[in-house]
Amino acid sequence: MSYILQGQTGDWEVVMGLEVHAQITADSKLFSGAATDFGAEPNSQVSLVDAGFPGMLPVLNKVCVEKAVKTGLGLKAEINPVSVFERKNYFYPDLPTGYQISQYLHPIVGKGVIEIDLADGSTRQIGITRLHLEQDAGKSIHDQHPTKSYVDLNRAGCALMEIVSEPDLRSPEEAAAYLNKLRMILRYLETCDGNMEEGSMRADVNLSVRKVGVKEYGTRCEIKNVNSIKAVTMAIEYEARRQIEVIEGGGKINQETRLWDPVKGETRSMRSKEDAHDYRYFPDPDLLPLKLETKWIEEIKQTLPELPDEKKNRFKGEYGLPTYDAGVLVAEKIRADYFEEVAKGADAKLAANWVINELLGALNKDGKTLEETPVKAVQLRGLIALISDNTISGKIAKDVFAEMFVSGKEAAAIVEEKGLKQVTDTGAIEKIIDEVIAENPDNVAEYRSGKDKLFGFFVGQVMKKMQGKGNPAAINDILKKKLSS
Amino acid sequence: MTKLTDLNIVEAVAARKKNEFSCVDMVKEYIAAMDKFRGLNCYITETPDLAIKQAEESDKKYAAGTAGALEGMPLAQKDMFCTKGVRTTAASNILNNFIPTYESTVSDQMNKQGAVLLGKTNQDEFAMGASNTTSFFGNVINPWKASGARSNQQLVPGGSSGGSAAAVAAHLCIAATGTDTNGSSRQPASFCGVVGMKPTYGRASRWGIVAFASSLDQAGIFSRTVTDSALLMEHMCGFDPKDSTSANLPVPKWSQEVSGSLKGKVIGVPKEFRIDGMPQEIEDIWEKGAQWLRDAGAEVVEISLPHAKYAVPAYYIIAPAEASSNLARYDGVRYGLHVDGKDLNESYKMSRAQGFGAEPTRRIMIGTYALSAGYYDAYYLKAQKVRRKVANDHVEAFKKVDAILTPTAPSSAFAIGEKSDDPVQMYLCDIFTSPASLAGLPGISIPVGLDKENLPLGLQVIGKPWDETTMFQVAWALEQAANFKALPQEVA
């Protein structure tokens, strides 16, 4: 589905690349031993290194390197055996040393790829240009005092992966799908929690527009402060329109950094190319080039989990699930694991339906996550087993599930307690059917004269008399026979 | 009886073990001497109370038989070394009020061996200089005086570790640390008639030393003798996981190996170091040094270091580039001098303008320029290439020789103010010490004689990477042969 914007002078196409900053899940910072918990008291997780005291030196955290390599492998990217940390120099109060240690000419991870899933069922390959390691800055807080700013250095020095895509994205939907898939991969790899609200995953959008059919890229703007997938979508729509209007109005797009204002729903200029910092990158003399042994990279490769795309394909093949269901189930690793636990020895399609429709529905309604589910996978499997062996009907099962969701009890116990066992005794069913036929002579006559639609009425009456516990298949069979005799 | 302040470390430890005096006695003599020579301005911060307390502890340890290798030795730390609870300024106004809550790895290791701290020595601001005339706390004055026409002039002690060198020369401490980025622990030693040394880059931890140019900075030491230098270095060096550029190598017992024979050793004399305008007497003493080494059994050969003459220009790109970044942290926000401006940028500008003196300012500007977009390749990258060529020259030379012998400096101590109008003249003081710094090699300056004005002259020995042992042995042989006993007039 192509995203074409109609302007006054013709049709326009949007070209985008994303730069994602993903905070690495690690107990300590990239170059210091300070802790990294979110939401801690301001300036309570700051070492002398983070605060840029005289004579302090950075020491690289191996865990962060391992996670960057793991992420690179998950993005099917080249891992560079030698990478170099450089200093990016600029002054700001939340940057205590006056430089950010980052990677510039020699990143740890090179070209890779992400496959995105679109609403129409199609997929696209989006190129990854590079992934590099860098330190985060602290936080400046401007709204606590009329004339002063506060600085919180808890975040200063936390490890980030900057993941840069090729300019392969063409629509807000694709950008959203890219972020979703990237987030999914990071969470599967457990290298970043992907939490955009807490800022552990942040995206900058590089966007330009061009007339449909034109090969050259237009001048791009970088949009910062897009802190949710919804914001990304909205910012793109706004910025694309803005650029088209400027160009069609005879203006020119200036290469600049723009800020997304989520309140006003617009982007505005932050700094132009002329004002851009000269960061004076140079190799950090406090750190030696980072050399990775092939053996170590291989060892990390061995620890890679099954990733969403592979899992989805397996679910389709192994469980015979439709693409949509498989996609929903693999969206979160915990969800996929839950499903597989339910599906053990059970009817997989039934298991998928129950997980997607009943369980996720109920959790969603209660505002709970799967981590908080009152119904454990093995319990849901127990419920499905009762359906499969005809102990209860699907309809009754929904009631039992509702009860399980509230009480956390086992399905079998609830069925027993409430006498919900399905009646499969044909004698008992026949007896009820006879009663129903006797009580509704008019309807019987109408049915027999050709009004087939009334069959449902009879089923309903029988079920009602049996309080829903009659085996539907048996009822159908016997009812059909009796009505046609 | 000789004064306690005349003893070197080996002598003092031996005498103290025989209970000839107490550590407190010795510290008190030093405190008195510091008082007497305060006019030399060797110290930025004196710590007499702390020193006496530490000396008392040391006396207890001698009594208990648990004395460390440097127990009770009254040392001074260059003000680049962060010392816990003791003001550390780097001789800059911007750190005028800075009291670290931590101790540098090097000084901590010395303290663990029982070192006593007399104070923090004066230096060039942020170790930038070769004459100790850039300190916010005033010039250090060389205790040596020229004879003859210039006898009323005050001379520079060299730099940047001028306070340490002058303090050791004037017997205001038994030894003192320095730092060496381009010769700062060797050139002042030559000017002040003491031993000054820097180890291989990576031998001593840089953790807790105020950074100037990280790829060049190394801790150094000033002492009365080569053996003291070796002993101190043994305890200053060693792997430190807190410094990523620190080498995980065992540290030899250098002090026990200094007297090793030079038989079969080959010493190189670089022909390019015979520069125009160098005084004949320096040329002569260099040749004399070579002869002493021949007498000690070594073979002396001429070598070529063709790129050595580009070392100083390359240094004056690389070091300012790194410094421009290293000194960015002094912004008046978290510690150090803060001057309130009308907004953030003005506060930055005012704090830094008032905090930094002329030399750091000049180097920050040079370094910022050298790293700027469009100039990076022409300056910084080119300088790095030159640095590699200088290092390769040494690699080639060391295929043929075991150590290199050169003069330490192209002159003896000059008068305060003499070169201050021309930074380039000042920068050329480092002409013989710079190549070893760029190549990361160990180097030592040994006093070997006096010039015609009765000012000390030093010779420099440069060793192979990680082979301080041979370097110390060559230096020791020179020390034995030169038998340099002269002292500044007022001290003697």
Image (cartoon, coloured by chain):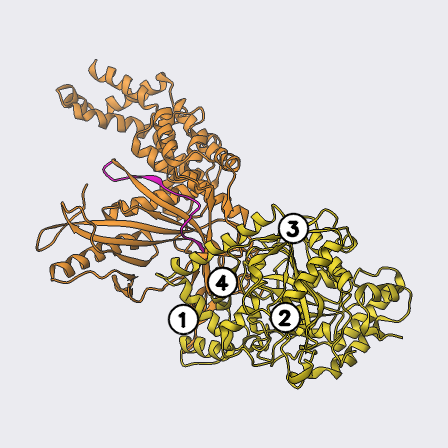
Looking at numbered disc 1 in the image, what kind of residue is underneath it? His
Chain-order first, disc 3 or disc 2: 2
Q: Which residue is mark 1?
A: A142
Give the image quarter of residue B59.
Answer: bottom right
Which quadrant would the N terminus of chain A be assigned to in this image?
Answer: top left
Q: Residue B40, how many percent across, how many down?
A: 68, 81
Q: Does A128 appear in magenta?
A: no
Secondary structure under the numbered disc 3 in the rendered image = loop
Chain-order first, disc 3 or disc 4: 4
Looking at numbered disc 2 in the image, what kind of residue is underneath it? Ser
Circles 1 and 3 on the same chain? no
- Chain in yellow colour: B
- Region in magenta: A101-121
Q: Which residue is mark 3?
A: B466
Check residue B322 in the rendering and tell me which mark sits there, or answer none: 4
In-front residue for pair B280/B156: B280
Structural distance between the alpha carbons of marks 1 and 3: 52 Å
Circles 2 and 1 on the same chain? no
Structural distance between the alpha carbons of marks 2 and 1: 44 Å
Q: Which residue is mark 2?
A: B161
Identify the chain of the residue marked 3, using the numbered disc in the image. Answer: B
Structural distance between the alpha carbons of marks 3 and 4: 24 Å
Q: Vertical placement of B27 versus A268: above or below?
A: below
Q: Are marks 1 and 3 in contact (CB under 8 Å)?
A: no
Identify the chain of the residue marked 4, using the numbered disc in the image. Answer: B
- Chain in orange colour: A
Identify the chain of the residue marked 1, using the numbered disc in the image. Answer: A
Structural distance between the alpha carbons of marks 3 and 2: 23 Å
Secondary structure under the numbered disc 1 in the rendered image = loop
On the question of residue A467 being in view, the answer is no
Residue B217 shown left or right of residue A414 in the figure: right
Secondary structure under the numbered disc 4 in the rendered image = helix
